[in-house]
Image (tube, rainbow, N blue to C red):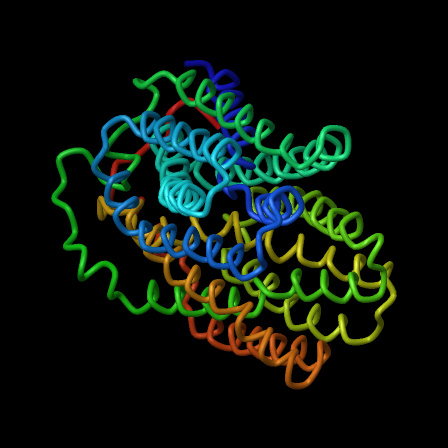
Amino acid sequence: MPTYACAAKLDRLNFFLADVRDGLGPYLAIYLLTVHDWKAGDIGLVMALGGLAGLASQIPAGALVDWAKDKRVLIVMAAALVTLSCLVALWQPGFTWIVISQVAAGMASSVFAPALAGITLGIVGPKAFTRRIARNESFNHAGNATAALLAGAFAYLWGPAAVFYLMTGMALLSMISALGIPPNAIDADRARGRQAGAALTPLRHLLSQPPLVLLALSCALFHLANAAMLPLVGQKLALANPDLATTLISACIVAAQLVMIPAAMLVGARADSWGRKPLLMTGFLILPIRGVLYTLSDDPIWLVSVQLLDGIGAGLFGALIPLMVRDLTQGSGHFNISLAAVSLVFGIGAALSNGLAGYVAEAGGYDSAFLVLAAVAGCAALLLMFLPETLRTAESATQSLDLSPRAAS
C-alpha cells in the first residue's frame, strides 16, 4: 500500500477514536445530574465502577491484542460496545442499566491503546515507530479538541443528550476507519514486537525487568500528581465564577489538547536523536512547576493559562510511553500486554489522585492540595532519574533482529 494511503487511514482512525477512548466521562455526570436528578454519590459510584472495570481489563486486553491476528476487529468490537453503552445510558437511565453500560464501556476502552500501538508497529516496524506513534498522538489530541468543541456546541443547541449521539457518530466513523486499513498491511508478528518464527520471551521475566518496573512506578507517581489537578482547578473556578465554570473548564481542556499536538510532534522529530529520557523528564518536571503556579492566584485567566502547561507534559507523556515500552520489549513478542501492564500501574495512580487531593483540600485548602500534588510530582521526576535511556535498549534489539519497516509513515 502507498505510504500516504496507509498514513491517512491511521490518521483518520486516531482522530475519530480519540473521543471514544476516553468515554462519556463528565458529560455523563452532567446528563444524569441535570436531566434525571441523580445524586452526586450515585454518579460518583457509577463512574468509579466504570473506571475500575477499565483497570481490571488492562492486562487481559493487552494479552488479547498480542494474541489476535487481526487487531482491527478488536477495535471494531470495542467501538461497537462503546456505542451500545452510550445508547443504553441514553435510553435506559436507571441505576442498574447505567452501571452495566459504564462497566462495559470501561472494559472496551482498555483495548484501544494496545490495539492502536500494535497496529501501528505492525505497519511501520520499529525503525519508523517513533515518528508514527507521535503522529498518532497528534491526531488523537486534534480529535479530542474537535470533539470537545462539538460537544459544547451540541449541548448548548440541543441539550446534554446530544453528546451521546456525537460519541456514537465518532465510534461508527472509527469502526469504518479501522476496517479501511487492509489486513495484509499489518504484520502480525511485528505488531506484537516479535521476529517471525522467534520464541516468545517468558512474560514473567519480561514484566519484572527493573527498567520496565521503574518506568511504570514513576508513571504511577506522575498520574497520582496529575489526574486531580484539572478537577481542582475546576472547583476553584466554580467557587470564584459559578456562572462561567463550565465554559472555563472547557477552555482549559481544549487549550491543553491543542498544546499537546506540537508536544507530540516534537517527540516524533527528536526522540530518536535526543533520546526518550530527556523529553520525558521535561514533561515530569513541568508538573511540579504547574502545581506551585496554581497557588499564586485565583484569577481565571491565570488558572487557564497555567493549565496550558498540562498540554506539554501530557503531550510528551502520551507519545513517549508506547515508545519506551517498545524499546524495553522489542523482540519479546509481548509488546501489547507490556504496554497494558504499564497502563494498569499508572492507571491505579490516576484513580487514587482525586481521593488524595480531595482529603488534603478538605483539611488544608486548595493551595495545600496543589502543593502536595507538586511534591508527589517531584518524587516522580526523582524516581525517573534512575531509569536508563531506553533508546539504547531498542537499538541493540533492533540490530539483533532483521526488522525493516514497511512502506508507511
Residue displayed at 60% across by 75% down: 373
Q: Position of residue 365 (x, y in %)?
A: 71, 81
Q: Which x, y percent locates residue 361?
A: 65, 78
From the viewer's perspective, is 62 left or right of 245? Answer: left
When asked about the image quadrant of residue 362, the answer is bottom right
Marker count (numbered)? 0
Foreground pick, 183 / 47: 47
Tell me: residue 80, above or below residue 381. above
Task: Note whether 68 is above or below 250 in the view shown.
Answer: above
Please indicate whether residue 264 sits to the left or right of residue 198 in the image.
right
What residue sits 64% from the left and 65% below the top?
Answer: 229
Quarter of the picture containing the N terminus is top left
Q: Is residue 233 above or below residue 150?
A: below
Nearer-the-camera pick, 158 or 55: 158
What residue is drawn where x is 48% and y is 19%?
3
Residue occupying the point 41% across, 36% down: 116
Between 12 and 267, the residue placed more toward the observer is 12
Drawn side of residue 261 relative to residue 100, left or right:
right
In the drawing, does residue 144 fall left or right of residue 212? right
Question: How far across and down, in percent of the image, does residue 193 sit?
Answer: 28, 42
- Seen in the picture, residue 184 relative to 130 is either above or below; the reply is above
